[in-house]
Image: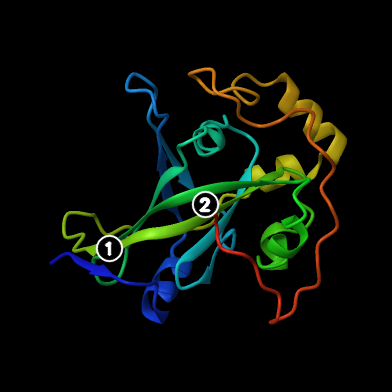
Amino acid sequence: MGKTYERIDERLRAFIEEQLVFFTATAPLSGDGHVNLSPKGRKGTLVVLDELTLAYVDFGGSGAETIAHLREPGNGRITLMWTAFSGPPTVVRVHGAGEVVLRDDPRWPGLFARFPAEAVEGQSSARAIILVRAQRVASACGFAVPVLEFQEERSLHAEYFNRKTDEEFSAYCEKKEHIATSLDGLPALPLPLPPQPATGPRTPETTAPAARG
């Protein structure tokens, strides 16, 4: 049976942060624009900041549709989804308002410090942080989702980009199609990328503001 929640409680938070993959969905305001659906991996690169706010690191290596849709004036719609491939069958969705925090945003150091160091530090390909303010939190049964056995994390993405300096990664982004603009011509990632700032202190007291909708 489906259920809605007023907030992300500790049980939901534990489920969300235990999943090894999640999915993001966004779309432009235009009715004939391209809907985007993306899988996201890299354990530790999504965190629950508070009962209604989540954040994940947006890495380079693909297009920038999510960034473009969230930056479109009057838009910001985003859905995050997690599904259990082992254990009790569960699907969790967060419908919300998203905000793109770019490298030159003064909030970057404090937000970046909220992610586990082993998941994000030394990652030149971290190009944005996506903040999501939950507007609807719901679960579903997931009875039709198959049971899958986890084998291992893929390390190819981290290994490839870890060899690049900040300057080399910025040059890489400038050469790729649909980074500065989306498939529908919306402004996406501002180029050239500003340098990645130093990370703030990693302490339990580190806090982050909620996403502005």
Q: What residue type is labelled 1?
A: Ala
Sequence-wise, which precedes: disc 1 or disc 2?
2
Q: Is residue 27 above or below residue 47?
A: above
Quadrant location of residue 68? top right
Give x and y (percent) for residue 108.
Answer: 73, 55
Give x and y (percent) for residue 103.
Answer: 75, 46
Q: Is residue 206 above or below residue 45?
A: below
Give x and y (percent) for residue 36.
Answer: 41, 33
Q: Is residue 66 left or right of residue 171?
A: left
Badge 1 is on which residue?
138
SS type, badge 2: loop
Closer to the observer: label 1 or label 2?
Answer: 1
Residue at the image position 74 percent from the left and 64 percent from the top = 110
Residue at the image position 27 percent from the left and 63 percent from the top = 138
Q: Nearer the viewer, residue 210 or 117?
A: 210
**Colouring chosen for the image of the structure:** rainbow
Mark 1 and mark 2 residues within 8 Å of each other at the beta carbon? no
CA gap between label 1 and label 2 equals 21 Å
Q: Which of 32 and 178 is in front in this view?
A: 32
Badge 2 is on which residue?
41
Q: Is residue 121 left or right of residue 61?
A: right
